[in-house]
Amino acid sequence: MTHGSLSPLAVRRLIVLVFSLGLIFAPLRNMAQHASAQPITRGAALRLATRTPRPTRTPAVTLTPTSTATATATLPPMVTTGPVVGGVASTSAVVFVRVSAAAAVQIQYSTDPNFSSEVFTTPGIEAVADSDFTAQMPLSELLPNTAYYYRILINNEVQTLPVQPHFTTFPSPDNVLDEFRFVVFSDANLLDQPSAVYQTAANDQPAFVMQIGDFDHRNPGVLPNPAVIDNWRVMHRDMLHDSAAGADFATYIGSAHPFFHMWDDHDYGANNADYRASWKGMALQAFKEYYPLPTLPNPEGGLWHSFRNAQAEVFMLDLRSQRSPDDASDGPDHSMLDAQHISNGQKDWLKASLLASTAKWKFVVSTSVWNPHSKQVDSWYQFQTEQQELVQFIHDNNITGVVILSGDLHSNGGIDNGANSYFPEVSVPLQSHKAEQGCTGGLCGDWSEGIISDMTQPGYALITVRHDAATGADSAILQAKGEGGSVRISYTVTLP
């Protein structure tokens, strides 16, 4: 054998070794190529970004590695919750989004779904840890009654979303539409199950959608204990996206319809909670982080607000953050609206706003039952002095077109023509709840057009506003509908 050359036996051994290494590493190389060829879905990427890495099994080899260095891939920030559009008016809107890490967030919007012309971009807003990486981005100088398409930019990169988000601005306030519809949800408690009612309601093509309390029943002011702001933040993420029901909301409602929300006790923080809650500040902060809102009359005091679509104005009452304890004695100071008599309080705002409204229809959202002949606890029944004050104010000032939209009863829908509730009232069907019978609080009560109390059947309310241009007649059709879209109860209100 010549010095420096390999023997035939050594050559054969080297060939076998090289071949063996090829067998070992080829599958790993194929797996890596296969993984790189597969698109990472939004949900899969989020799971990669948030889950604890599992230890990986190292293939058995005959060679001892000379290095144990590893590399960790860092995913760029991405959308985790939203977008949701709200605070919509004739020329403005607000878009909410949450991202996975600190980043600059923008909205790019256009009337062109292909974004090939007239594309506008909002200034960047920093999503930071202090606000749970959420951003609220106002859109201004929009055209009335116009469809807009939008997309999310994170650090100047356009994000790929499962569906193309869009919305339509409201008409100018002085416009009267021949017809429009809106949807109302209330009382949900089965977030771990798909919610078909969202798709059904979306098929009604509503101009906007409302959720009027108890979006969930987890009582974040109580559990987990002690109460921390993440209790509310996690709940909001679940309701808007991170659950089976939340995924349906994101697909059928949040991505396509202006959305307005008001809390009741269980999503405020605790059963029958009022202004005394020690965690109220955290509840308010988390709500403002996660829901796109119109301008609030008193943002430090509470969440009450109003908005207008054509000939209808909606007054969203906050019946928790300024509410007296239910069991206190009724009287002039016992208040659903202003227990603390704060400056620029809710009751004064409601009276002044009703008086000033030029809308034909005034829909008042009461997250607690308004009808005093219905639920007798945690309802307006315990606040009859203040209720009578409001009723008298409306009558004395000849304010017409008042309709009450109420939640919390856990009915499958009820409607009163005003015989029991002073004004026409809809008890909005529960959206989803554990199977029970009867109404919460033990009394469904008297409703002139009927009430359904089989709590195993979800549903929603549909309100249709009509104007007959030929005759000048104005009407509002109030309907309680089932999960499949069937009409359970219907009543038509006409203006004098």
Image (cartoon, grey):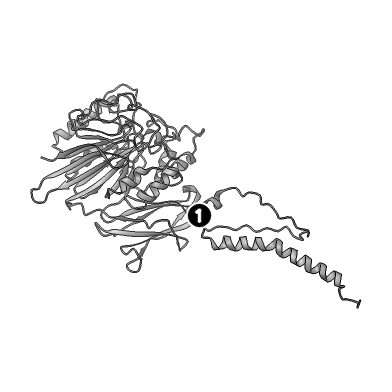
Q: Position of residue 468 (x, y in %)?
A: 12, 49
Image position of 142 with respect to 376: above or below? below
- Kindly identify the amino acid type of the residue bearing the numbered disc 1: Ala
Q: Is residue 7 left or right of residue 478?
A: right
Q: Quadrant of residue 409?
A: top left
Q: How many marks?
A: 1
State the residue at coordinates (42%, 31%). 270
Q: Quadrant of residue 353?
A: top left
Viewer can see residue 294: no
Quadrant in which the N terminus appears: bottom right
At x 18%, y 40%, the residue is 355
Outermost residue toward the top in this view: 329
Q: Is residue 315 above or below residue 176?
A: above
Horizontal and vertical percent position of residue 275: 37, 32
Q: Secondary structure at mark 1?
A: loop
Q: Residue at x 31, y 21 (%)?
A: 329
Give whichever of 461, 233 is nearer the camera.
Answer: 461
Asked if residue 326 lies left or right of residue 313, the reply is: right
- 10 Å crowding of disc 1: few (<14), some (14-19), many (20+): many
Q: Position of residue 365 (x, y in %)?
A: 27, 38
From the viewer's side, name the closer residue of 44 and 494: 44
| The C terminus - image quarter | top left
Residue on which the image places disc 1: 102
Give the farthest residue toward the bottom: 2
In depth, the one of 375 and 60 nearer the eye is 60
Left or right position of 301 against 30: left
68 versus 397 height, above or below = below
Q: Quadrant of residue 158?
A: bottom left
Res. 69 visible in picture = yes
